[in-house]
Image (cartoon, rainbow, N blue to C red):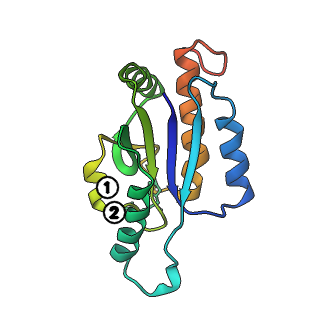
Amino acid sequence: MRLLVLAVGTRMPDWVTIGWQEFARRLPRECPLELHEVKAEPRTSGKPPAALMTAEAERLRAALSARRRLVVLDERGDDLSTRQLAQRLEKWQGEGDDVVFLIGGPDGLDPTLKAEAHERIRLSSLTLPHAMVRPLLAEALYRAWSLSHNHPYHRE
Ligand SMILES: C[S@@+](CC[C@H](N)C(=O)[O-])C[C@H]1O[C@@H](n2cnc3c(N)ncnc32)[C@H](O)[C@@H]1O
């Protein structure tokens, strides 16, 4: 199983890239965590947020492969404990599909993408900056993997 994070926005600040890499590189070869970025629509275009999100959704869809489980990161999604996330990862691994985690841009994700997703999860009830979600998600996935594999990073 591959874990792919598909995110709106390129040219992230260094702290985002460093934070992402810090955790993504810890995942083992049999469960790699990869990042794929699509361009955000320029916020200077004067387009309304819905039009910006539609354009970004087209780019996200173009980057999606056919056989994958789609998980949307959304502040209104389901709350998962680390154990629940670990159980999800184990289940997805058993099903054999790659898992794609979608992170929206500054205005969020187009509602049609949210509707298409198999799951919607949140990392907090707070609205987080989209850039910050990347390292937080990488850490959460590494922690969940650690729990499943009895790795000292997270044991219960
Ligand atoms: C600034 S937020 C967009 C907020 C926007 N008002 C909305 O309704 O989605 C940008 C992206 O970051 C992610 N995000 C923000 N807060 C999150 C949270 N608490 N949990 C999970 N993902 C979050 C989502 O993917 C969202 O599309």
Residue count near mark 2 (Cα–Cα under 10 Å), binned few <14, some 14–19, many ≥20? many
Q: Position of residue 23 (x, y in %)?
A: 66, 36
Separation of residues labelled 1 and 2 (CA atoms): 6 Å
Is residue 129 something that shows in the picture?
no
- Which image quarter holds the C terminus? top right
Report the disc number at residue 113: 1
Callout 1 amino acid: Leu
Which sits in the foreground, 114 or 69? 69
In this view, 155 is above or below 105: above
Q: How many labels does the image show?
A: 2
- Where on the image, by quarter, is ligand 1? bottom left
> What residue appears at the point 48 percent right and 63 percent down from the top-left corner?
105
Which sits in the foreground, 145 or 25? 25
In the drawing, does residue 111 fall left or right of residue 63? left
Callout 2 amino acid: Asp
In this view, 92 is above or below 54: above
Which sits in the foreground, 82 or 7? 7
Q: Is mark 1 on a helix, strand or loop?
A: helix
In the drawing, does residue 106 fall left or right of residue 115? right
